[in-house]
């Protein structure tokens, strides 16, 4: 894999084809991993299979020595277990991470403002979604403005607390914006970039450790966005990215007991 239009990009939107298919990997415990089970996404323009998605399933033997020969569902479970209920940061723990995410947002917003990077994501969205250039560009624009809004101290200000006077002298109640810890974000196919980024960054800003599942038909967009965020300083262990079917994801949700900050139900189209 080589560097393309943007930092850490592994594909060129215009070059993806049946003869030169792209691959979408999973991210767990800071490592990009494949799978023994590859799902194929068909090019809507000509019907050729042009994207291979490494999907996690429930089969396989757990073996930390071979990324293609273990039950990756358990790897995702292990990854979430490193995040306590009080999150990766909160008002009393590692508050410098609020500023770190302000810096990440500033760098990512700047990257998306560059015509070359913006065009890369617009073209990539168009390869997997029935959108015009302007419609796809609107997604990139909204995402860029969102990140711009949380530059510098804005993430820290988002975590501001409040105090309420008590009913007698010396009494006071304080409230803090607190993380949930391990959370899951499941997003639909109709907004491959905007919805996942906004929900993901909101969870990260407040100290949660998300596992993100995007519809496999469009997950290549978010995979490339995560690689861009890593180049902007996002710690690779802070987010897990999973490709799987609904049954596997449901089992993972039940076993881990995730809180789900965002979820949209999709019907299977036959």
Image (spheres, rainbow, N blue to C red):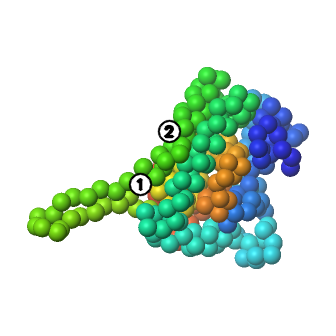
Q: Circle 2: is it few (<14), some (14-19), or many (20+) Cα within 10 Å?
A: some
Residue pictured at 58% horizontal, 54% vertical: 100
Say if residue 11 shows up in the picture: yes
Q: Which mark is residue 159?
A: 1
Q: Is residue 217 left or right of residue 205?
A: right
Q: Earlier in the sequence, mark 2 or mark 1?
A: 2
Percent of width and height locating residue 99:
54, 53
Residue pictured at 82% horizontal, 40% vertical: 4
Q: Which mark is residue 149?
A: 2
Between 238 and 45, the one lying in front of the other is 238
Q: Circle 1: is it few (<14), some (14-19), or many (20+) Cα within 10 Å?
A: some
What is the CA distance from the residue labelled 2 to the residue labelled 1? 14 Å
Q: Secondary structure at mark 1?
A: loop
Q: Residue furthest front?
A: 170
Between 7 and 73, the one lying in front of the other is 7
Percent of width and height locating residue 70:
74, 72
Between 42 and 183, the one lying in front of the other is 183
């Amino acid at each position: 894999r080589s560097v393309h239009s943007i930092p850490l990009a592994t594909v060129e939107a215009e070059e993806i084809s049946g003869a030169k298919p792209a691959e979408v990997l999973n991210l767990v415990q800071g490592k990009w991993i494949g799978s023994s089970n590859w799902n194929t996404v068909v090019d809507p323009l000509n019907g050729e299979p042009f994207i291979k998605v490494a999907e996690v399933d429930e089969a396989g033997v757990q073996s930390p020595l071979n990324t293609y020969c273990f039950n990756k569902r358990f790897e995702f479970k292990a990854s979430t277990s490193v995040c306590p209920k009080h999150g990766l940061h909160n008002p009393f723990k590692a508050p410098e991470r609020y500023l770190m995410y302000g810096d990440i947002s500033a760098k990512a917003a700047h990257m998306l403002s560059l015509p070359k990077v913006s065009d890369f994501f617009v073209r990539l969205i168009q390869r997997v979604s029935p959108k015009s250039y302007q419609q796809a560009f609107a997604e990139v624009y909204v995402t860029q403005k969102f990140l711009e809004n949380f530059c510098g101290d804005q993430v820290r200000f988002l975590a501001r607390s409040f105090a309420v006077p008590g009913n007698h002298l010396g009494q006071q109640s304080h409230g803090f914006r607190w993380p949930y810890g391990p959370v899951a974000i499941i997003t639909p196919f109709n907004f491959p970039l905007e919805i996942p980024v906004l929900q993901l960054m909101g969870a990260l800003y407040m100290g949660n450790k998300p596992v993100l599942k995007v519809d496999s038909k469009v997950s290549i967009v978010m995979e490339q966005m995560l690689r861009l965020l890593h180049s902007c300083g996002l710690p690779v262990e802070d987010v897990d990215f999973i490709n799987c079917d609904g049954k596997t994801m449901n089992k993972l949700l039940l076993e881990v007991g995730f809180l789900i900050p965002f979820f949209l139900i999709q019907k299977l189209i036959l």
